[in-house]
Amino acid sequence: MIRLTSSAAVAAIVLTTTAALADNNRFNFSITSDRKESDLGVPSSTKLLVGGDHTFGNGLILGGSAEYAGTAFSSSATANLETTLAYRIRFDEVFSVTGSVGLGGHLQVQGSGQDFPYYVFRAAADVKLGDSFIWNAVAFRYRDGFSASDNFLTPQLATGLTYKIDEHNTVGGKIQYNWKDWNPDTIGFQIAYGHSF
């Protein structure tokens, strides 16, 4: 398990670095505030994510990311290092869908907990609204550890809006509904910045 987690961590770093060196790539950064689903006034965690990906001309997208999460009112902190392979289909100039598969490593950075590998599937649909806005209409994530004892079944449903500042830069926001073992858990509010080159 530890060896798999270490391999996933190395792969995520290598892919993110590779994406930064190649053409037709994208770098992104986001901050997410997760709030208790039952009471949005109560914070659950804050997440910082840095990622990068390379989009090939045939629609394939190779990516990697590192996410740090600090739990509110606690010294506990975790990190998710992830690699993904995605495929985007553009039906026309307005509508596109993307699906991806990925492997990751969940690391206990502070506090008690075990490191373990996980897998993730994502599906998303985007709608272009004119030249400047993209409605990230729906995005679904299914994520789980390879062992039930990892207790990492964490599906997510999200929607958001992206604003294109210019040819290379975007900003955006999303609202995310998170489950834990299919029980309502948190609602996340995310702001993000992206740079393509």
Image: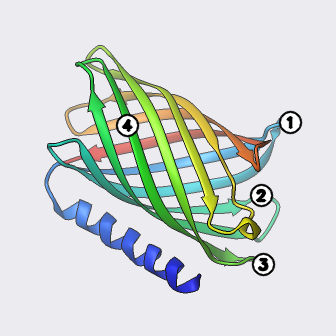
The residue at which mark 2 appears reads as 72
Residue carrying label 3: 112
Q: Residues within 10 Å of mark 4 (few under 14, many from 20)?
A: some
Mark 1 element type: loop
Residue 150: x, y in percent?
A: 72, 68
Q: Nearer the viewer, mark 4 or mark 1?
A: 4
Vertically, is 12 above or below 63? below
Left or right: 157 as drawn, with respect to 98: right
Do the residues bearing badges 4 and 2 touch, measured as CB atoms within 8 Å? no
Q: CA distance from mark 3 to mark 2?
A: 15 Å
Amino acid type at image mark 1: Ser
Mark 1 vs mark 3, CA separation in Å: 26 Å
At label 4, the amino acid type is Thr
Looking at the image, is mark 4 or mark 3 nearer the viewer?
A: 4
* Element on which disc 4 rests: strand
Earlier in the chain: of badge 4 and badge 3, it is 4
Above or below: residue 60 compared with residue 38? below
Name the residue rendered at 51%, 79% in the picture.
Answer: 4
Q: Are marks 4 and 3 in contact (CB under 8 Å)?
A: no
